[in-house]
Image (cartoon, coloured by chain):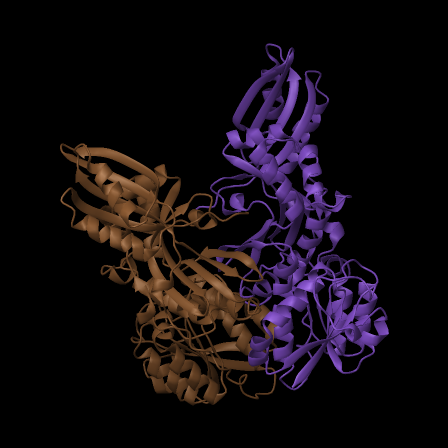
Chain colours: A brown, B purple
Amino acid sequence: MEQRIGLLGCGTVGGGVIELMRRRKQRLQSLTGWEPIIARVLVRDVHKERSVSLAEDMLTNDPDVVLGDASIRIIIETIGGIEPARTFILEAIARGKHVITANKDLIALCGEEILEAADAAGVTVLYEAAVGGAIPLIRPLQESLTANAISDLKGIVNGTTNYILSKMTETGADFDEVLKEAQDLGYAESDPSSDVDGLDAARKLTILASIAFYTRVSLSDVEVTGIRKITARDIAYAHELGSVIKLLAVGTERDGALTLHVRPTLIPKSHPLAHVSGSYNALFVRGDAAGDLMFFGRGAGALPTASAVVGDAIEVLKTMRQPQNGGYAPHPRPHKPVDQERAESASHYIRLSANDQPGVFAKIAGVFGDHGVSMETVLQKRVAAHSAEIVIVTHDVHARHLRAALKQLEAHPDVTTIHCIMPVERSVNA
Amino acid sequence: MEQRIGLLGCGTVGGGVIELMRRRKQRLQSLTGWEPIIARVLVRDVHKERSVSLAEDMLTNDPDVVLGDASIRIIIETIGGIEPARTFILEAIARGKHVITANKDLIALCGEEILEAADAAGVTVLYEAAVGGAIPLIRPLQESLTANAISDLKGIVNGTTNYILSKMTETGADFDEVLKEAQDLGYAESDPSSDVDGLDAARKLTILASIAFYTRVSLSDVEVTGIRKITARDIAYAHELGSVIKLLAVGTERDGALTLHVRPTLIPKSHPLAHVSGSYNALFVRGDAAGDLMFFGRGAGALPTASAVVGDAIEVLKTMRQPQNGGYAPHPRPHKPVDQERAESASHYIRLSANDQPGVFAKIAGVFGDHGVSMETVLQKRVAAHSAEIVIVTHDVHARHLRAALKQLEAHPDVTTIHCIMPVERSVNA
């Protein structure tokens, strides 16, 4: 029996969904008992040339033709962005349609509103593709791992920044140069700020943390530092220290309180996350029962994203074989305070320039010592006449103490500039 | 409302399940709407001291007390091995109970029988814990990734051999020495053959391949080589070649035909599987839409295994909130021939000893050349007077050609011994 699907948007992801559903036609039928048909496709311009061939009468630029079609019980949204996607999805839910979306911005910002509307209407909303592209993350966190109290999430969830940092590591080039190259290749947007300033990663962390920590997290809870300030020199020093630099999205829960950060981080080469390069994404998870886990794969692209979308579609189709009796009762999700100050002590990498004079290093070491910050490794290089570059890796230190030491150093007459401060990830013990 | 569960076996895994269900009591209730209670525990000796505290009247050594209790609708089996686990599970299914098992041996050997019985009885049988311990593998393959035609599975799925190979790599010690140490530490069994000869990995590959390739694979389809013949010297050469040695379980599908192997393999250090060490497991998957994926985590242990078992229990409990209307219609699974000869050409590592005389190497090279096997890297070392050890890494070569060359070399008067032949894994391009 046919099951008609409405597709909103027919760009890269939408095209991938059509292509993949055609490839798996038979399997979809044998797995779900339905013959799923993409019946209507909402586009801006019905005359535009497209990479997938579509019967002309499937295309429409009128949302009501799709949303108002009572024979369509599943909507796949691949438009992206907040509006009009949000209005279309709420409208679809109100009309009793199940919704599958790849829209991370929308789920990060309006996820609560949308999921509550779905609960009320007794329909399913799935969004596996919103984080980590093809990598199954949402469902494993929500199902296979629900028996765990998850304490740590660490993700490389933005392909653009990972590509830029990987390229900087390979070539020794500086940020601006690699960014330009990435833009020319189409790996970075002409306005790259959402990626390189860490906002995209923060949105994904919001979604993952809400599920993993079994609560609701909002975007403003996340402390964000991007990668614009990382230089070729930091990458070279990281290498000397046996590490690589990655933009990590980190969430922790300790005693019921959360910390949420996106920031460049040194990762030792022995850590599984260190080897996630180029456009790959990965999520590292620690559960009280499961221990350490990592999920790795393609974070973007037409078919990888379609893989997750069509996987969700299969799930919805399977559910529709059973009599509709509403979703599971919405369960209470405890509120958990975000308390960034509770971040545990961690080792830190600090790069600064100082006057190259006898006794200066001792003074700097003295400032750290006064604040209880002890040093594990020091690299000192003379960069120009009268100026030395000093790289310090601290032992574990609490953010409060480090901040106090750095504040004093900033005002120190011998310190020219503090260039870079990053946490250093611990190795995973196998 | 209570939902009574019967637990078969109360060893390491069973104890972990009880412990974890106690820890997550509240969440299980809020997620599933049921209050799950472990009502009966089948053990051999009711008087034995146990690490978890249990009310005395919960314990029984009579299977009928558990299986015959009509108020128990879920059975969790943690006994392991084929019998009596198989009989108990079939009995539970026949009485309309859902079953969760961590039993890889049973699912590998009798999976078809058990799943068909479950289909007929309209109950659910889940076995996420059977492969990869805490790592969600079965469900992601069966659900999130079902939109993919999966072409490649590569798994490190046996913790004991991975521990031994990791230790050999770290310490430079030989196999026998590390095996003994692993036995003393309890990481290897006193009869280690199921692990070190690759049978355990082959059973897990049988389960994974059946799901990933959407067919039924039996254990006898898998070609198995264990790790007994790997020496410290092979590990050192692998290191010189920028690689590590891992016991890989490999399944491929090309044009509808499968190849299934378990064997030691050289993996370049740039490959994500190279960094899976100690007791960790990992599965690398390639799908036509998703591209390359990897899942990594703890492959064994009380709580990691319990994480997967209780995750399955939550799934069953959720399903039980809906009216029982049987499982999904059993879908036809196409038969796929296993054709090991279809294995694609691959680079190979070969270590052999030969007489250390002028012209011998040229003769060996000539034999390879005659069979169309070209060499990428050659390491030649004199080991003892008149005896040279030669390590050859070939370019991609078809197994048939390599076999012919090796057969001729075995009979060659200048070749003393062919010590070791292993495939070399390609790097993953990010």
User: x and y percent of residue A239 in the render?
Assistant: 36, 39
Q: Is residue A421 left or right of residue B177?
A: left
Q: Picture quarter containing residue B42?
A: bottom right
**In the rendered image, the vertical position of residue A207 relative to residue B343, given as above or below:** below
Q: Picture quarter containing residue A363?
A: top left
Pick the front one: B53 or B145: B53
Q: Is residue B22 left or right of residue A58?
A: right
At x 76%, y 43%, the residue is B193
Q: Is residue A397 left or right of residue B72?
A: left
Q: Quadrant of the N terminus of chain B?
A: bottom right
User: x and y percent of residue B295 in the render?
Assistant: 54, 56
At x 59%, y 68%, the residue is A27
User: x and y percent of residue A89 in the render?
Assistant: 38, 81
Query: Can I make out residue B334 in this image?
Result: no
**In the rendered image, the vertical position of residue B117 relative to residue B261, given as above or below:** below
Query: Can I make out residue B245 in this image?
Result: yes
Pick the front one: A364 or B405: A364
Outermost front residue: A370
Pick the front one: A157 or A215: A215
Q: Is residue B107 left or right of residue A410?
A: right
